[in-house]
Image (spheres, rainbow, N blue to C red):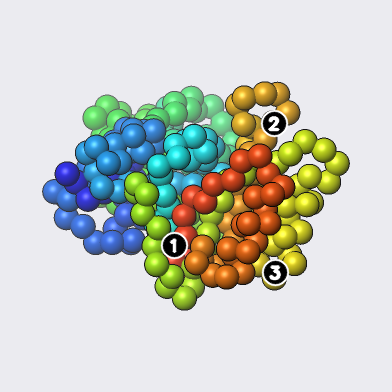
Amino acid sequence: MYKMGYLGPSGTFTEEALLKYQEMSTDETKEYKTISEVIGAIGREVETGIVPVENSLEGSVNITLDILARKSNLVITGEVIIPVYHHLMGIEGARIQDVRLLYSHPQAVAQCRIFIEKHLPGAEVEVTLSTAQAARLVSERRDTFCAAIGTRRAAELYGLEIIKENIHDYDCNYTRFIVLSLNQINQPSGRDKTSLVFGIKDGPGALYQVLKEFALRNLNLTRIESRPSKRNFGDYLFFVDLQGHLNDSGVKETLEAVGENTVFLRVLGSYPEAEMPLKQ
């Protein structure tokens, strides 16, 4: 069994996050085409999987949240945050003014929208499963009118030249990745984060009744987001990250109180909180 699965091929931001989280050799990791495949392989082909969960510009990765909500045996055991740099790349001799076909992942396209509208207004955009796949497609086509948006590592791996560096619309561009395994809660590290998902009872002030329990015990919520439950129209699940470990007395007490005001509550994991990286 491989140690970790990730969204491939080589050269993706997910692979970059994996290597930052833990150095591994290529024979210890296994690449997959989609986030769903990565998560589905945990416990069968790989011990753990690393997937993106949110971006500072585009928000949450919905497919990751939806799978977390329905797979009760998945546990978050770690996280890593990386700065995101998007580069326009093509084969030798490619120029911005010649690009008529642009490949990249939908998130990368969204994060470079201003650049694309200004410099590539006539280019057809073809979405790919990853930025690395986009780079590989351009390297295989060998046409100067094709370009990809991806990482510097992807350009190096697939023999492409950087046409234009740092084409993302905003400098404050970071992606958070989570490491998933089966039923494994970490011991406290002293600087932890706990993730939850819950559904609330229908009625006035229902969400307030839940959130006040965190405030009463001075627990800091670092993130809260809602997603449709996919059961009934108007039903939502709430994803919450808070500072503290499941074994902390204040967190335990809070979860007991929250459980009384929810129809569904599950701890997604307690794990060391990642440090925010510095932009280069």
Report crowding for label 2: few under 14, some 14 to 19, many 20 or more residues within 10 A (C-alpha). Answer: some
Image position of 225 with respect to 278: above or below: above
Residues under numbered marks 2 and 1 in contact, where contact means CB atoms less than 8 Å apart: no
| Residue 27: % across, % down | 13, 48
Residue 100 shows in the view: no
| Residue 25: % across, % down | 16, 55
Estimate the spatial distance between the alpha carbons at disc 2 and disc 1, rounded to whole Å.
29 Å
Estimate the spatial distance between the alpha carbons at disc 1 and disc 3, rounded to whole Å.
20 Å
Question: Dividing the image into 4 quarters, which one contains the N terminus?
Answer: top left
Image position of 202 with respect to 221: above or below: above
Q: Which residue is mark 3?
A: 217
Q: Nearer the viewer, residue 157 or 37?
A: 37
Q: Secondary structure at mark 1?
A: strand
Residue shown at the point (24%, 43%) measured from the top left: 46
Name which residue type carries label 2.
Answer: Asp
Q: Please name which of the two marks, 1 or 3, marks the residue nearer to the observer.
A: 3
Name which residue type carries label 3.
Answer: Arg
| Residue 226: % across, % down | 66, 41
Report crowding for label 3: few under 14, some 14 to 19, many 20 or more residues within 10 A (C-alpha). Answer: few
Q: Secondary structure at mark 2?
A: loop
**Tag of residue 43:** none
Residue shown at the point (46%, 55%) measured from the top left: 269
Q: Nearer the viewer, residue 176 or 164?
A: 176
Residues under numbered marks 2 and 3 in contact, where contact means CB atoms less than 8 Å apart: no
Name which residue type carries label 1.
Answer: Tyr
Q: Which residue is mark 1?
A: 271
Q: Secondary structure at mark 3?
A: loop
